[in-house]
Amino acid sequence: MKYGIFFMVVLTVLLFTTVGFTADVEIALEAELANVLQAPMEIADDEQASDGKYVWVEGEPAGHERDHQGWVEFIINIPEAGKYALWGHVIAWDGNSDSFWVTWQPADPNENAQQTQNKQFRWSVVHGNNWHWDRINHWLDEGTFDREWEFDEPGETVLRIGGREDATKLDAVFVTSDTDAVAAGQANVRLPTDADRKLQVEGLAVDAKGKVTTTWGSLKKAYK
C-alpha cells in the first residue's frame, strides 16, 4: 500500500510540473494605452468598452474619407520563444467598416501595410454592433484564415494595428500562445483588469498563469 501512495505522490508532482511548463502565455492590453497613437487614430469614450475607452479612426460606415490612415503600436516583450495568436475586442458595423492592417515584428517584415496594402496583413473583422472578440486573421482573396506569429527567441516585439476603414473600433488586444483555439472561450480571452492596466502603464507585462513578470518598453503617456 505504501508503494501505491508513493506512486500517486510522484505522479501528482509530475502532473503539476508538466502543467507548469505548458501553461499558456496570456497578456491583456488596453488599446488606448498603446505606446504610440498615430492620428487620425484617436481615443473615444464608450461606457460599454473596457474601462470606458477604445480607439478608432472616426467616421461613418461607408465614409472612407480617412481609410488606410492612423495606427496604434504596442511594444510587447515576449517571455518565451514560440507561436502566438492575437484576439481583438472590436465593433465592426458592416462590410464598409470591418478591417484593420496588422503587423507584428520581427515575425512580420518591417513593412508599412497601409502603403503596400499587402493582403497578408489585412484583418477582416467579424461584424457586430456590440463589443465582441475576434481572432486576427489573414483576409485573402480566397477567404480568411487565422493568423499566428512565430518568434525564434524571447524579447521585445512591436505590434502595429493600423486603420484600414473608417469607423472600425478596437477596445483591447489579447496575446496568447494558444494558437489552436478557434473560439474566444477556448482561448480563455479576457479584458484587461486593473492589474493589467497598471502593469501596462508601468511598462510591465505578465501572463495570467503566474509566470515570471517580464518588462517591456515604457509607455509615452500615463494612464488617466
Image (spheres, helix red, strand yellow):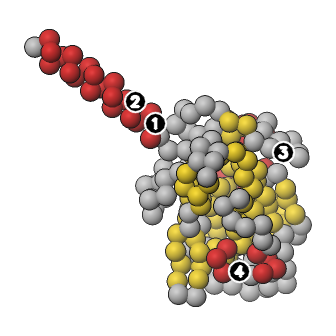
Query: Label 3: which residue?
Result: 219
Using the image, determine if residue 209 lies above or below residue 169: above
Query: Label 1: which residue?
Result: 21
Q: Distance between the Cα atoms at labels 3 and 1?
A: 30 Å
Residue 50 versus residue 104: which sits nearer the camera?
A: 104
The structure residue drawn at horizontal position 76% and vertical position 75%, both measured from the top left corner, is 113
Q: Distance between the Cα atoms at labels 4 and 1?
A: 37 Å
Q: Earlier in the sequence, mark 4 or mark 1?
A: 1
The structure residue drawn at horizontal position 60% and vertical position 79%, both measured from the top left corner, is 139
Picture quadrant where residue 91 is located: bottom right
Horizontal and vertical percent for residue 195?
67, 35
- Circle 2 residues within 10 Å: few <14, some 14–19, many ≥20: few
Label 3 sits on what residue type? Leu
Label 1 sits on what residue type? Phe
Q: Mark on residue 118? A: 4
Horizontal and vertical percent for residue 221?
88, 45
- Circle 1 residues within 10 Å: few <14, some 14–19, many ≥20: few
The structure residue drawn at horizontal position 40% and vertical position 30%, both measured from the top left corner, is 17
Query: Label 2: which residue?
Result: 17
Q: Are marks 3 and 2 in contact (CB under 8 Å)?
A: no
Camera-nearest label, 3 or 2: 2
Picture quadrant where residue 208 is located: top right
- Circle 3 residues within 10 Å: few <14, some 14–19, many ≥20: some
- Circle 4 residues within 10 Å: few <14, some 14–19, many ≥20: few
